[in-house]
Amino acid sequence: MAKTKTAYFCQSCGYESAKWLGKCPSCNQWNTFVEEIVEKNSAAIPSWKNDTSARKLSKPSKVDEIQNSTERRMPTGDKELDRVLGGGLVEGSLILIGGEPGIGKSTLMLQLALNLKGKKLLYVSGEESEQQIKMRAERITESPSADCYILTETSTQNIFKQIEILQPQIVVVDSIQTLHSAHIDSTPGSVSQVRECTAELLRFAKETGTPVFLIGHITKDGAIAGPKILEHMVDTVLQFEGDRHHVYRILRSIKNRFGAAAELGIYEMQGSGLREVSNPSEILLSQRDEELSGIAIAAMLEGARPMLIETQALVSSAAYGTPQRSATGFDTKRLNMLLAVLEKRCGFRLSAQDVFLNIAGGIRVEDPAIDLAVLIAIISSHQDIAVSSKNCFAAEVGLSGEIRAVNRIEQRIAEADKLGFESIYISKYNLKGIDIKKYNIEIKAVSKIEEVFGLIFG
């Protein structure tokens, strides 16, 4: 009888060690090593096509001899999901979707399964019973797809048996942390099990050309649970974000081998499921009856999608000795840098003021093109002077106070023009190659931050 082989794995990063260690040398975390059985006699255990003699052997090919063919994409019927995936599902792709508990990952995938017409889909659930899924399905749609099959199973060997019988065109697994393989004698959700189950599903997806969705849990730090290699193995990593107490959800692409890795999809959570939001600018701009100070509109770009967002600032006298600097949805270090520019270049004394910044709509922005809107909102609140809601801003601010050009300015201008804004402030270095006459919006080109303050505040 073969001896069982064990090893110690870091539950944080997946580092393997022959003995127990107090501190992981890879991620520097303490007390994360757990003993797991990594090998046992598995000759009699069936797996997905474990007979290597039946597989076609790969041979090396010259680069210039490889036939160039475009990926065949399969539309899902969900425009927001198709946008984030890069235009649709690619055959044989493995897609990992992560997010907090209760954010709507299972609802999104079940909604995809029920609304997909003409494709046979297998929804594998290791967390819910068939009756629970049926109740949610009745709430989501009145006429579910007849080709949606539900399987409540956690053993990968049994799942692959049903797949060979059913021959589905798409597979959804909810969730990867609940599956277990008989090849690994450790608990479901452990590093070894997650890695082995994902590897088996990856082999199945690539050999059959079947797209596979994996729903993944996240840790308390917000990272996808399991070893980091899990994200390297899959083709696409999607993050489902949002606050459970708000109705809007954001589907963000973190990694995508078949498209842009910075795309964004926005949904609205309703009682009947998730509704696609085709025009996110409408939800990111609050409707107000009167002009208020401390508010400025920025034209940002997330992936290939232009959006107009509302930046809100509040400047007040510091109640304690050290003034507070707080930002929601914006980098706090960049906020401190912009405040230093106001102090040094423009003469505004904000060192004894509390400054609070908020990006409306619960979205997090990394586009430097909102710098100018942030400064305008801060000065508007500091001077208690309202900025017209018909003005918007799209420019980066440098350390010397110069207004710097941003990329794809024409898309930002077109979005502001479509939403009815009267003027947009951009860098004069962005004017090259722009046909101003084709826009109804007034384009105001500036080069220094003092020019903007003169035009806005007089």
Image: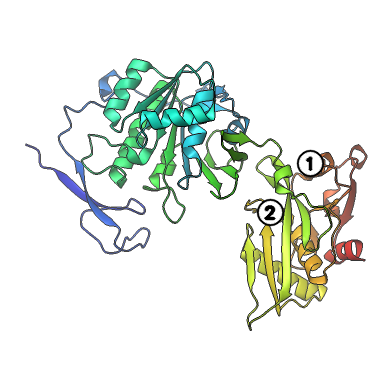
Percent position of residue 280, x then y: 69, 42
> Residue at position x 28%, y 26% from top?
158
Quarter of the figure with residue 209: top left
> Residue at position x 28%, y 44% from top?
192
Q: Nearer the viewer, residue 196 or 61?
A: 196
Q: Residues within 10 Å of mark 1 (few under 14, many from 20)?
A: some
On the question of residue 434 being in view, the answer is: yes
Quarter of the figure with residue 409: top right
Percent position of residue 436, x then y: 90, 42
On the question of residue 64 being in view, the answer is: no
Q: Which corner quadrant holds the N terminus?
A: top left
Q: Is residue 103 above or below residue 169?
A: below
Residue lying furthest bottom: 321
Q: Label 2: which residue?
A: 360
Q: Label 1: which residue?
A: 415
Q: Is residue 397 above or below residue 150?
A: below
Q: Nearer the viewer, residue 154 or 230?
A: 154
Q: Which corner quadrant holds the C terminus?
A: bottom right
**How are the residues colored?**
rainbow
Which mark is in front, 2 or 1? 2
Left/right placement of residue 208 relative to residue 139 reads: left
Distance from disc 2 to disc 1, alpha carbons, whole Å, reads: 18 Å
Q: Nearer the viewer, residue 392 or 430?
A: 392
Amino acid type shown at disc 2: Ala
Quarter of the figure with residue 19: bottom left
Left/right placement of residue 238 relative to residue 377 reads: left
Mark drawn on residue 391: none
